[in-house]
Image: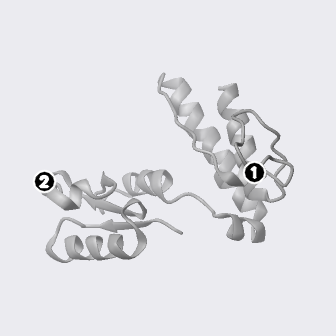
Amino acid sequence: MKNILVIGSSGQIGSELTMKLRGIYGNDHVVCGYIPSAAPKGELLESGPAEIVDVTNGAQIAEVVKKHLAALLSVVAEGRPQLAWKIGIDGLWNVLEVAREHNCAVFTPSSIGSFGPETPHDHTPQDTIQRPTTIYGVSKVTTELLSDYY
């Protein structure tokens, strides 16, 4: 599932569109983009992610896109392994470097894709063998190790 950014989501049309898309694709997959003078309220704000996104500020838009929309799911990654690596590893490297420079913490989620056929399926231990068979899984294991390094 790709994430969706709705710019102007606190306006009349945008607010209805955002809620409709959240109903279809799930609350976590639709980002409510707004400007500070028109901050979302109530269900629009509480039901999913919201970010300040001024359409006249390209850098700000890029930051929100990187934060919420920069990901490739396993099937897509298999068809574009170099892009999967660039987004998954190089993108995380950038985030970790900024966090290091500014003394910030980063939470790096992993995925069941980081396991492989040798991983125990029942009562999977926290520390276990990870031998994924997809580029998505390989990149997830790499992000885990890179995050540990940082």
| Residue sitting at the far top | 103
| Residue sitting at the far front | 122
Is residue 108 in view from this perspective? yes
User: Which numbered marker is on residue 78?
Assistant: none
Q: In the visual, does 34 lie left or right of 99?
A: left
Q: In the visual, does 124 lie left or right of 21?
A: right
The answer to whether 136 is drawn above or below residue 94 in the figure is: below
Q: Amino acid at mark 2?
A: Ser
Which residue position is annotated with label 2? 37
Query: Which quadrant of the figure contains the C terminus?
Result: top right
Q: Position of residue 52 (x, y in %)?
A: 28, 52
Residue, x 48% and y 22% (percent of image)?
103
User: Which numbered marker is on residue 121?
Assistant: 1
Q: Image quadrant of residue 125?
A: top right
Q: In the visual, does 67 lie left or right of 74?
A: left
Q: Image quadrant of residue 43?
A: bottom left
Q: Image quadrant of residue 28?
A: bottom left
Q: Amino acid at mark 1?
A: His
Disc 2 crowd, CA 10 A, few/some/many (<14, 14-19, 20+): few
Q: Position of residue 99 (x, y in %)?
A: 52, 30
Q: How many marks?
A: 2
